[in-house]
Image: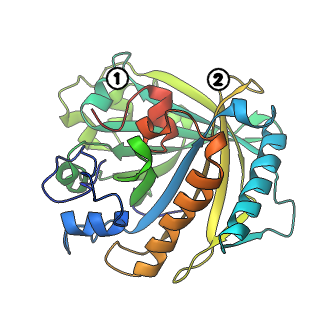
Amino acid sequence: MIKRLVTLLLIAGLSNSGWAVAGEEAKPLYLRQIQAHPAPKLDDVAGREYKFLIDPAKTKDTPAAAFKDLWTKVQAAAAKHGFTVTEKEKNPLKVEMTTKEYLDTPEQALWKKGYLIRITTKYKAGIAEGSGKVTVKAIFENLDKTLAAPLTVVGIKSESECQDNVGMAAGGALNGYVEKGASFSITLSDLGRMTLGDFGKYIPELLTLGLPADTKLVSNKAYSYRARPGYVVLPGTEPCGVSMEGWALKEDGPIFLYDFSYGYEDLTLYENAETHQAGERFMTKVLMGELAGVALPDDGKWGGSKVRAFMKRPISK
């Protein structure tokens, strides 16, 4: 899992939600980010994930068939551009199911205040487990606020994350945004009625947002079908795990969105320049280039983020 989970400035002088000005697109994204935020500003951003959204209408009609189709296309495109893509030896296209629930008020008051709550529940033999993984993310438009969010978890074992996410920007360039988060696993019944206060017991920061503890949160649930077929090999880091994921609104329902992602951890933007450059080149040449025909038409609106597309929250104003 990529460590350390929004938005980065792309060049100096722009607002946090701005795109690169004319002429800057030719400069690699990581260099634009460093120019905007010299060391040590981004020292806590220790990992990168590259995300590409795919239109379900432009691939096969079931997750298993779609993953096979997309993986074959990626392998061919990677070879064409000199990249090494390896495949797992055993059952590389095995499909796993989970649910992803995004909890907020009907008006998305939490998102507007810069926070997101997600519960991930695994399924075994078609039956949901009794426990789930809660993730709370800081998703401020202002980078300083995102990095400063404590997201302190109390009373239970947790893990933290802060990563740079790379996706397609409007006009076909690359955009980066940072997400910071904290996660913990819990028996779902311990979350009570899943009010804001039920989550605030574990992350007290949620109770400082000006919303009552008894605020009712509604569930926006996606059924996730995922395959992890292999790795993208980039210089300067371990082979990067690939994930292909499709979301449906009901179990075994039609997929409304696919994505292809890969990434690495334990590297800041200030080190291993060859890794970042190769990662960006794979994104632009293999995915945004050779696989442009299967891309979600408005991918640039969401920066590669499935949840932003799902919740109708564009990455920039």
Q: How many marks?
A: 2
Secondary structure type for disc 2 = loop
Q: Nearer the viewer, residue 85 or 290?
A: 290
The percent position of residue 95, horizontal first and vertical second, equals: 79, 47
Tell me which residue sits at (24%, 54%) in the image. Answer: 9
The percent position of residue 126, horizontal first and vertical second, equals: 80, 35
The percent position of residue 3, horizontal first and vertical second, equals: 45, 64
Tell whether label 2 touches label 1 (CB within 8 Å).
no
Q: Sort mark 1 into few (<14), some (14-19) or many (20+) by Cα contacts within 10 Å.
A: some
Secondary structure type for disc 1 = loop
Question: Residue most toward the top?
Answer: 106
Question: Residue most toward the right?
Answer: 90
Residue 156 showing in the rendered view: no
Q: Where does label 2 land, which residue? A: 249
Q: Amino acid at mark 1?
A: Gln
Residue 308 drawn above or below residue 36: above
Q: Where does label 1 land, which residue? A: 108
Residue 147 showing in the rendered view: yes
Split into 4 quadrants, where in the image is the C terminus? Answer: top left
Colour style of the rendered protein structure = rainbow
Question: Which mark is on residue 244?
Answer: none
Q: Residue 276: which quarter of the image? A: bottom left
Residue 107 drawn above or below residue 130: above
Q: Residue 106: which quarter of the image? A: top left
